[in-house]
Image (cartoon, rainbow, N blue to C red):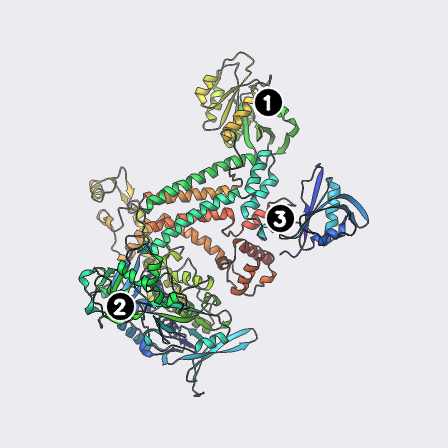
Amino acid sequence: MSQDTIAAIATAMGGSGIGIVRISGPEAFSIAEKMFRPKKENKQLSREATYTMHYGTVWDEEEMLDEGLLLLMRGPHSYTAEDTVEIDCHGGVLLMRRILETALKRGARLAEPGEFTKRAFLNGRIDLSQAEAVMDLIEAENETARKSALSKLRGSLQKKIGELRRAILQEMAFIEAALDDPEHISLEEYPGKLEILTKNWLEEVKKMLLSHENGRMLKEGVKTVIVGKPNAGKSSLLNVLLGEERAIVTEVAGTTRDVLEEHMQLGGIHLNILDTAGIRSTEDQVERIGVSRAMEHVKDADLVLYVVDSSVPLTGEDEMIMDLLEGKKTIVLLNKSDLTGIVTKEQMEARLRQPVLSISAREEQGLEELERLVKELFFQGEISFQDEILITSLRQKKLLEETRESLKLVLESISNFMPEDFYSIDLMNAYASLGKILGEEVEEDLVNEIFGKFCLGK
Amino acid sequence: MRTGYEETCDAVVVGAGHAGCEAALACARLGLETVIFTVSVDSIALMPCNPNIGGTSKGHLVREVDALGGEMGKNIDRTFIQSKMLNLSKGPAVHSLRAQADKAEYSRSMRRVLENTDHLSIVQGEVTEILTEDLEDGRRVTGVKTYSGACYYAKTVILCTGTYLRARCIYGDVSNHTGPNGLQAANHLTDSLKGLGIEMLRFKTGTPARIDKRSIDFSKMEEQVGDERVVPFSFTTDPESVQIDQVSCWLTYTNEKTHEIIRENLDRSPLYSGVIEGTGPRYCPSIEDKVVKFADKSRHQVFIEPEGLFTNEMYVGGMSSSLPEDVQHAMYSSVAGLEHVKIVRNAYAIEYDCIDPRQLKATLEFKDIRGLFSGGQFNGSSGYEEAAAQGLVAGINGARYVLGKSPLLLDRSQAYIGVLIDDLVTKENREPYRMMTSRAEYRLLLRQDNADLRLTGIGYEMGLISRERYAHVLEKERLIASEIKRVERVYVGTSPKVQAFLEAHKSTLLKSGTNLGELIRRPELSYDLLEEIDEDRPSLSPEVREQVNIHLKYEGYIKRQKKQAEQFRKLEEKRIPENLDYDRVESLRIEARQKLKQYRPASIGQASRISGVSPADVSVLLVYLESRRK
């Protein structure tokens, strides 16, 4: 158990109505007693039962800071598996800081980033995949992502991967046993049997990886790029989309590029929208840089919204854009549907084999259809997050890809008629990769790496 | 009781079985004045159970012992009467050499080697006490005392007592307090060891009956002949010298009647009635265990193997037992070909004291007694080969301890010996430990065919391998590398000769040119087969050709396995200080803390293999060591 007691503000700093200061460690109760006075004067916090709420006032020496509730949890029945108190108070930034400072004055130490969760992990309360889920939960910004993070926290990822891993182990054990006891355990017809099993495992891993694509998009938002010729109506489309959702639109500097991205929700899905310079062939040096940058963005995009002015004929520049869109998830938006259409839906569908929608940015028509299509494209309709396993961290994705590659190699060995003892090498790798996702295989630098990323207070 | 006889030497080895012989030879060859004790000089390198050396994964051990400078491989090459490379239909990782020994010759030949090794003396006598002295910072071994009271002072003592400690042989309700073959048991040493705080276990093993060859009807059995071309165990043996006339073994089977007899008499088995307390080996089960465990099998293999050229006694492999004498007669004579069998020696089970080897470091030195080493069945293993491997390592490390040199440590990615010792000193072992292919995670790297390439350099560094022998291995390495390079470059066109060759071997014809290496990788082809279309091929030894073939054919697998081994080594290299105070490591679970304090693993890797220490505990340790380093 930890020697010292840590404290931090556990809720987001901002204008929320309620704030929580969390204190965890052997001194948690005695620190709480020094700064929280229960309404009932003879009540002694350190003698109270676990999972009890206490109403009272928070004090720094003789100055009353706030009134609030105190939640008391005794280790190991708390998040960190240590004695823990949470003080719920009124959320102002300054007030919460004062309360935290008081806790520090009374003997607590300011928690390092992710330290509560780190303690929970080290005390065996949660495994690594759960720890990662907590991190996701803190970072998840929209409703669907929060649901998925919660379901992972309950261990559905852990369960699914655990089952897969056990199945692989069983086959490894069988092969090994047969090698050492050929008299009693026969490998006759075994390769065919393993082939079927491996194909099934491969399917499951692929499914999980697919969910990673969804998961990443849920968490980070779908990278969406709007392209089109100048004056096709890109900016007005963007304005309409943003205008509708103005209340939650934020401007955040892109993390990977030096451009500003717009964040918005469409049908519960988080989109990071990037407006690009109009694409046209030009001799102008400056414009050419803008165009090539637009092309770069298209390459990275999860979704491209291609805006076409349907009231004028297609040009060579449109052809150039369409070549660029080869193999990209694209929605073609025939804008200016309120005017006489020259470019038709059929024409565009035939050329790009991508969904085409008629809209009018000016009249705000066709936007509901767009919302439906965005959802459909990424989730094949509505997804039920309750049974879906979402792989959301890059590390998990990498490990799943490794698992997939190892399983493919097992199939390769079988089809090349390799002796059975060769199967174990790649089965062992698949088993280890899955184990790393669960934290059941020791990896040297992982622990610090993961916990270094946590927000303060969780 | 005091005879007053005293002698001072450098090293004392207790026991002259397969472990003791290797330990004593290593010490003496490294220049230590060495005394080896045996209860009977006539039982040096005795094979009290099966009459063979090697077999699946055990053959690997013998070759590794040989590459490090041990004697077992050479000795069986001198005394074998049949030899076979097993598992040739499987991958190269599980090919394994096994040879039938002439038991008497094997023992005599080893005795001759011991008797003619400088710095080595053989003493017949029972060691009853380990002498130690207490120092400020621990305890140190100083010698041994014999039953007659003589004291032999030494800087290092290596215990290789095999199955002799408080041994008891049992069949039915008959129980003799003797070692194997009626040899005198060692009844006093256990108390001395316990007095030193060493934790003892009681294990059991068993052996089948020996029968009279003249009473066997071989016409009802399948003959098992040796290989046409014998591969020697030792890398130093001239392959031509082992192409001898071989004798046959015979295969027959138990049947429902055999099983019925056994089942009906199970209540008379000392194992099932509770007379035997020791734990027996799961992987070398008695016939009664097999009948119970594999109840659905209608028959089990029985191998009839000669005990040697000097005798008519035959070993009944696969039917070890501790059932009463009358049941044994009924049981054996129910087997096809054994209807009129005459039993020379009964099958019996043997119980003996051994240690919990987790009290040892991976050097095979006791963690709490400096200079005291141990090897073989005393450490809870089973088998001659496992014993020899440990004996060699204990001997080398005993010598290096005396000479003030850093110890020999082999890890799981280097050798089966590394796997064997790591398993013994790390994992909980409730039965005699037997080497098995499946225990070696990196077995594609640890093949029997490359034991010389893996370990001769280490043997040279230890001082047991001559400069010439090491130079020979380096030259072999060079030849392999340059030949691999060459075949990767040899262009093969679509000439009629090439296509005809491919067609003859049912291999897809070439559409365009390729190189020889690519063709070797085809499952139906091999390096040797391709000689026909490889005109400029240099003349190379079969050993070099084999390495080139394996390297090219399984390159992808070998690469992946090497990567696994590298990962493994990373955690092995994270050493844990010997004096680490686990009470200061926060957040360890109680069970993990206890286990770590008790067994004091040498590395993070070893810690992760201790049962009761979870990955989260290992992470805690990692974090702690990291923060200490900063």
Mark sitting on residue B329: 2
In the image, taking residue B99 as reference, residue B144 lies left or right, namely right
Front of the two marks 2 and 1: 2
| Mark 3, residue position | A79
Image x and y of residue B364, in percent: 45, 68
**Chain of the residue displaying label 1:** A
Mark sitting on residue A235: 1
Nearest the eye: B222 or A360:
B222
The residue lying furthest to the top in this view is A340
Nearest the eye: A223 or B219:
B219
Image x and y of residue A426, in percent: 40, 47
Nearest the eye: A430 or B545:
A430
Residue B227: quadrant of the picture: bottom left
- Whether tag 2 and tag 1 are in contact, CB under 8 A, the answer is no
Mark sitting on residue B561: none
Image x and y of residue A87, in percent: 71, 46
**Chain of the residue displaying label 3:** A
In the image, taking residue B445 as reference, residue A277 lies left or right, namely right
Front of the two marks 3 and 1: 3
